[in-house]
Image (cartoon, grey):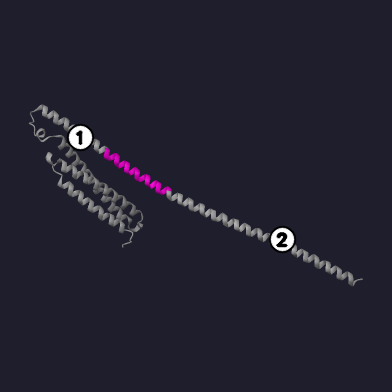
Amino acid sequence: MDNTPTSLFESYERDFNDITASIKKKLDQNGGDGEQAGVESRKAALRRVEMELDEGDEMISQMEVEIQGMPQSIRSKYVARLKAGKSELAKLKKQAKDLSTQTMRAQLLPASLASAPSDDPYGTDQRTRLLSGTERLADGQMRLEESRRVALETEDVGADILRNLRGQREQIEHARDTLHQADSSIDKAAGTLKTMIRRMYQQRWTTAAIIAVLIVLIVLILYFKLR
């Protein structure tokens, strides 16, 4: 197993390239102005494209995480590759959005209405209203997609904050354990010091008693000799 700092990044990048190639293929196959009969198949393809775009976002997030653990000497090269991947994914998202707008128009405009004579004012007005409604729907969908993207980014930020808080909590708990160990060591040292002081006083009293006995003996010896 390859354990180099870039191995996981390159693995995610290969998966990302496979996903974008699949998205391009689906968009190219459904990119023309199809008839009403092809609307449902195009919608199904767009649903699959949407799922793969989400997978692409996930691969980008994983690559961003891997870059953080790379050495500074090689990080810039992989940052450039990540930016290229982000740009490619953004372009595919735009193509998917444009294709979704075309699909909604094809679904709202029957073929007979789309081919109505230009000198029919009622048909033209109806088509104009339908096109305007389609554009509003497309704009609403774009806003929904933007809101979803912001929500996902907010979720990622929240997850990062939770990870940081968890790391800080572990540091605090480790510091608390270290403090408890230090308190225990201080208590042991204080007990040892008290024992040493007590023994020191005992030795002093013993020494003083011995000196007193010697003095008494000397006085007695002198007394008996001088009688």
Q: Name the residue carrying label 2.
A: 201
Residue depicted at x 37% and y 44%? 158
Q: Can the viewer see residue 34?
A: no
In the image, is residue 82 above or below residue 220? above
**Crowd band around label 2 with a 10 angstrom C-alpha radius: few (<14), some (14–19), many (20+):** few
- Figure check: 97 above or below 118: below
Q: Relative to 198, is 21 on the left or the right?
A: left
- Rendering quarter of residue 125: top left
Where residue 135 is drawn, which disc sits there?
A: 1
Quick one: label 1 or label 2, which is nearer the N terminus? 1
Q: CA distance from mark 1 to mark 2?
A: 98 Å
Q: Amino acid at mark 1?
A: Glu
Q: Amino acid at mark 2?
A: Tyr
In the displayed structure image, the side of residue 185 where residue 194 appears, left or right: right
Query: Looking at the image, which residue is at 77% across and 66% down?
Result: 210
From the viewer's perspective, is 54 left or right of 102?
Answer: right
- Tell me which segment is drawn in magenta: 144-165
Secondary element at image label 2: helix
**Secondary structure at numbered mark 1:** helix
Secondary structure mostly seen in magenta is helix
Report the residue at 25% width, 55% height from top: 14
Quarter containing the N terminus = bottom left
Coordinates of residue 24 in the picture (x, y in percent): 19, 49
Judging depth in this view, the residue of 102 and 41 nearest the camera is: 41
Residue 63 horizontal/vertical position (percent): 31, 53
